[in-house]
Amino acid sequence: MAANPLATLAIAVFLICLLLPTSSSSSSICVARTQDHVRTAFHFQPAKNWQNDPNGPVYYNGMYHLFYQYNPHGALWDVGNLSWGDSVSGDLVNWAALGNALDPTAPFDANGCASGSVTILPDGTPAILYSGIDADRRQVQNVAFPKNPRDPLLREWAKPAYNPVVPLPADVSANDFRDPTTAWVGRDGLWRFAISAVADGVGATLVYRSADFLRWERRAAPLHASQDAVMAECPDLFPVAARGAEGLDASARGAGVRHVLKVSMPDTLEDYYAVGTYDDAADTFTPDEDCGGGDYRRWRRIDRGHLYASKTFLDARRMRRVLWAWVNESDSEADDVARGWSGLQSFPRALWLDGGGKQLVQWPVEEIETLRTRRAAPLQEVEPGGGVREVTGIVSSQADVDVVFEIPSLRRAEGLDPGRLHDPDALCREKGGSLTGGVGPFGLLVMASGDMREHTAVFFRVFRILHEYAVLMCTDLSRSSTKAGVYKPTHGGFVDVDIEKDMSISLRTLIDHSIVESFGGGGRTCMTARVYPEHVAAGSSSHLYVFNNGSAAVKVSKLEAWELASASVNVDDDGGLMAGGSFANMCRAEEYNSS
Ligand code: DQQ
């Protein structure tokens, strides 16, 4: 955990850079630093090795911190080596790598430093709460504090010898007690955190309470228990404003405050959430929509695609709640080893409660706009019944695409049996983007090869169900890669919008070499996918198209497609020295923040 001289030098230069005025010439040294064809340009990655869950994201002393589950010794999962990687940013876009914040060095975490969170204590000190796997392979809960709280970069962390602060309870098995949330304060003035466990054979989210952040006592009832005994991981309980997009502190309560409980289900690697009521006297959570007798799998999904272990934090700089999540690989472990790295973080998303109060809305943080360079040529018409128009003028493998489809008439919408509503993945598989339809399929073809042998379709299809309409959103990966051994599912989800009233639907898609993150209906349905196009490996560039395979006309009433510059993301974590482009981008970020 000790800082080395190279890291100190890099950080010193970084801090000097924050003070310097920027110029267009400085930003021009921001060069693409893609190391191979699937490495991303603006998604968070360490320079090398394995990463998984985001841990303890926090805004502290003018800097954003992202800790993450990290194996410093290789590109594969290895629980015994799990550490907390640590990076800092001025803008959530450009990141500088620091040394690890936590390594498995103490008896209470000798077999791995697993997931956890950061809480800012009343005196301003940040505290890490994390799960350690101890020398006897039991999961226990530990604290860590900065060695020097005045260090704005929080480079070194101390793990007090009095750990663990919460040992393994008698009714919980050694492997099923982990991932403490950010702590909050109840109306009795006591701290609380929530944690995942299987207690007495029941999968539950437990709550612990403390007056001093050191001695913790378990609450009698769980925050929530699932009838299903599977261990849910990485819980996140956070307040949201009943109206408006403003983010709230973890301890917010009272009129106008709702709560969201999110859990991650390890058997399918899917994140589920419910909007509901948190009773701060009993420390229990009751979902508004109870459609499954407490089974988390009946709740809404954070993302209908490939995204896991999400975690939010309050960004106090801009008073918004921001979500991070792990997006793992879909090709083989041999590919991970060959590349020398595995795993991405989703692009940070602001999230808030939709006006109807039932679902979250997620949207890429606006700082992404600092990366926008060239804008694509405008495009309005795509003929129905197989029309395809190319979006030109940008490098589309590194792009931010925002499109609105106007639907003049729903008359041609295909009928759908209501029984088909429960499995949108299957519906998307059956009614793929290349097949013809009524109102849709229409949408985008991304990361497409010139001969179209490879492409990923992100699209909508509108169905009539009795006297109502439903909008299906799909990401079809079946032709995303010609490479063998790649997992190529079709993701599906319904978009909870009133299409009859709106007569239009929006699609925002972030394309970054091997990840495609899509936001349908203004961020009401989100879908993340991993792609491994071989045409790029062979040296060809990718194409981007708008298509309509439905028989009904659809108008492109808005198309903003931007090529994005490469962010500076942990360019070199061997001691933390970053390339010149990093500093230029950090400066640009500061300029943006102060504007
Ligand atoms: N990964 C962590 C655990 C968590 C799981 C260990 C979720 O703490 O439960 O890396 O991906």
Image (cartoon, rainbow, N blue to C red):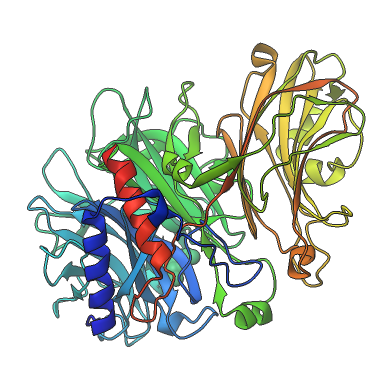
In the image, residue 445 above or below residue 379: below
The picture places residue 295, in percent across and down from the top left corner, at 54, 46
The picture places residue 426, in percent across and down from the top left corner, at 79, 45
Q: Is residue 260 left or right of residue 9?
A: right
The picture places residue 177, in percent across and down from the top left corner, at 37, 67
Q: Quadrant of residue 164?
A: bottom left
The one nearer the camera, 505 or 8, is: 8
Q: Residue at x 35, y 45 (%)?
A: 237
The answer to whether residue 485 is seen in the rendering is yes
The one nearer the camera, 114 or 343, is: 343
View quadrant of ligand 1: bottom left
Q: Is residue 49 left or right of residue 511?
A: left
In the image, residue 572 above or below residue 328: below
Q: Is residue 107 left or right of residue 300?
A: left
The C terminus sits in image quarter: top left
Q: Quadrant of residue 320?
A: top left
Number of marks: 0
The picture places residue 503, in percent across and down from the top left corner, at 70, 16
The answer to whether residue 142 is seen in the rendering is no
Q: Residue at x 48, y 67 (%)?
A: 52
The one nearer the camera, 119 or 16, is: 16
The N terminus sits in image quarter: bottom left
Give the residue furthest to the left: 123
